[in-house]
């Protein structure tokens, strides 16, 4: 459905609790990775969670819909995206549960204070700045390439924001898995759970979901792979369950 305010905006049904998301088609629109992360992450009753690089606010909104946490925060450096996230929170009447803050991930611990959250989630840029073709659209370039922050910045600040035994959830690409694990352990976020996402059962994985625990013991659980599509290109039952269908 198109918004009457701006022909480049649309309103998408999030398919949970009647929530909707206003998306600007000139900016980065959320994809399957955000939905998968919001289902993989868990926020328990009474806990506070923060999403680093929240874009238009989709992950905090989905987390609120799927969990019983006390409060959710989104941190976003791009003013236009942060403003849109604020609108989305208001559109869904969630201003008492979700706060959007405009700011730099590299300064997150200074902004919010150390050990402020029980849960950190992030769907960061997958490509280092030198990888792949650069996009002329600044929103897409920042979302896909490590232009404004690097993987180490995100993991370092996540460790700073988390309470002891707090949980870290991230979706990323498998080709950077060795680097991810190394940085997590360097900053005392022990990898605890991992799930690989395959487009088809006979194709190599193109996403990885990771849970870590700050100060946790060394024990990693590898979950059953998630397959996105059946042979006929329809979504698998497991994928539909993550979408809430």
Image (cartoon, grey):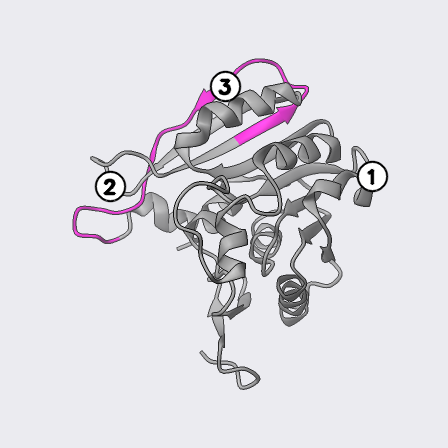
Element marked by disc 1: loop
- Magenta-colored stretch includes residue 217: yes
**Closest to the observer, 185 or 195:** 185
Distance of mark 1 from mark 3, alpha carbons?
29 Å
Q: Quadrant of residue 157?
A: top right
Residue under numbered circle 3: 220
**Closest to the observer, 159 or 66:** 159
Q: Residue at x 54, y 67 (%)?
A: 21
Q: Where is residue 39 in the image (x, y as percent from the top left)?
A: 50, 44
Residue 234 position (above or below residue 91): above
Residue under numbered circle 1: 113
Which corner quadrant holds the C terminus? bottom left
Tell me the magenta residue range.
211-234
Q: Where is residue 194 in the image (x, y as percent from the top left)?
A: 46, 28
Circle 3 residues within 10 Å: few <14, some 14–19, many ≥20: few
Which of discs 1 and 3 lies nearer the camera? The answer is: 1
Q: Which residue is drawn at 62% across and 49% down?
A: 53
Residue under numbered circle 2: 200
Checking the image for residue 184, the label placed there is none
Q: Earlier in the sequence, mark 1 or mark 3?
A: 1
Mark 1 near mark 3, Cβ–Cβ under 8 Å? no
Distance of mark 1 from mark 2, alpha carbons?
42 Å
Which corner quadrant holds the N terminus? bottom left
Answer with left or right where residue 104 lies relative to residue 35: right
Circle 2 residues within 10 Å: few <14, some 14–19, many ≥20: some
Q: Position of residue 45 (x, y in %)?
A: 69, 42
Element marked by disc 3: loop
């Amino acid at each position: 459905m198109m918004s009457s305010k701006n022909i480049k905006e649309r309103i998408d049904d999030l398919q949970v609790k009647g929530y909707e998301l206003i998306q600007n088609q000139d900016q980065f629109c959320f994809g399957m990775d955000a939905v998968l992360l919001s289902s993989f992450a868990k926020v328990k009753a009474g806990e506070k969670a923060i999403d680093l690089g929240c874009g238009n606010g989709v992950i905090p909104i989905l987390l609120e819909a799927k969990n019983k946490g006390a409060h959710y925060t989104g941190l976003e450096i791009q003013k236009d995206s942060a403003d849109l996230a604020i609108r989305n929170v208001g559109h869904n009447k969630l201003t008492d549960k979700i706060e959007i803050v405009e700011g730099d991930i590299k300064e997150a611990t200074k902004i919010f204070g150390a050990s402020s959250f029980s849960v950190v989630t992030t769907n960061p840029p997958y490509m280092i700045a030198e990888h792949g073709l650069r996009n002329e659209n600044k929103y897409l370039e920042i979302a896909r390439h490590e232009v404004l922050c690097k993987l180490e910045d995100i993991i370092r600040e996540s460790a700073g924001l988390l309470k002891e035994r707090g949980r870290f959830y991230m979706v990323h690409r498998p080709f950077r898995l060795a680097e991810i694990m190394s940085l997590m352990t360097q900053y005392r976020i022990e990898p605890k759970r991992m799930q690989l996402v395959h487009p088809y059962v006979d194709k190599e994985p193109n996403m990885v979901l990771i849970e870590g625990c700050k100060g946790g013991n060394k024990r990693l659980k590898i979950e059953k792979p998630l397959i996105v599509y059946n042979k006929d290109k329809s979504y698998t039952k497991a994928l539909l369950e993550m979408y809430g269908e």
